[in-house]
Image (cartoon, helix red, strand yellow):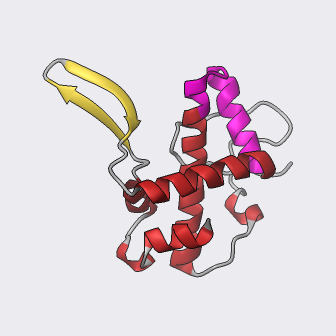
Amino acid sequence: MAPLILGEIGDIRTFSSSRQLIKLAGLDLARIQSGQFEGSLHISKRGRPALRSALHQAAMVSVRHGAPFQLKYLQLLQRNGATVGTKRKALIAIACKLLRIVYHVLKHQQPYHEELVFQRSNIGLEGTHDVDQVGESVVVTKP
């Protein structure tokens, strides 16, 4: 999965922020509007489908096997109920987080350290959790 993600991203220096990379993947939020009509938010899907698919698969694996990602996923489900739509939105949020991590690891040429990525947190590992919006950065601290 990593070679596919890296191949789809290309040269990381062409991106000035992780938001541009999220847009490349088509995971950015979009709303259809016309006159008085204002539709609901959804992912734009304007980016590269192979990158989006690889990130979705990576998000599913990280939710199953990565404790901080699993906690965030369960928190999002608990907040909005475990419906099919909520599960998809939670996976998109995890995919965006993974893409932000990839961006920073590549851009700064630093190895991945879970304790650094998840050091500033609004999520505790044992108690209740505060939830941010889908697609925003989430970090976890250990008690």
Quadrant assignment, res 78: top right
Q: Is residue 27 magenta?
A: no
- Horizontal and vertical percent for residue 132? 57, 37
Is residue 99 left or right of 128 when viewed as pictured? left
From the image, give the main secondary structure of the stretch colored magenta.
Answer: helix
Residue lying at 36% horizontally and 54% vertically, measured from the top left: 47
Magenta residue span: 67-87
Give whichever of 103, 130 is nearer the camera.
Answer: 103
Q: Is residue 123 visible?
A: no
Question: Is 74 rendered above or below residue 82?
Answer: below
- As drawn, which residue projects farthest toward the bottom? 109
Question: Is 63 rendered above or below residue 22?
Answer: above
- Horizontal and vertical percent for residue 35? 13, 22
- Horizontal and vertical percent for residue 113? 73, 69
- Horizontal and vertical percent for residue 54? 56, 57
Question: Is 123 rendered above or below residue 142?
Answer: above
Residue lying at 38% horizontally and 70% vertically, measured from the top left: 15
Give whichever of 88, 94 is nearer the camera.
Answer: 88
Residue lying at 39% horizontally and 51% vertically, measured from the top left: 26
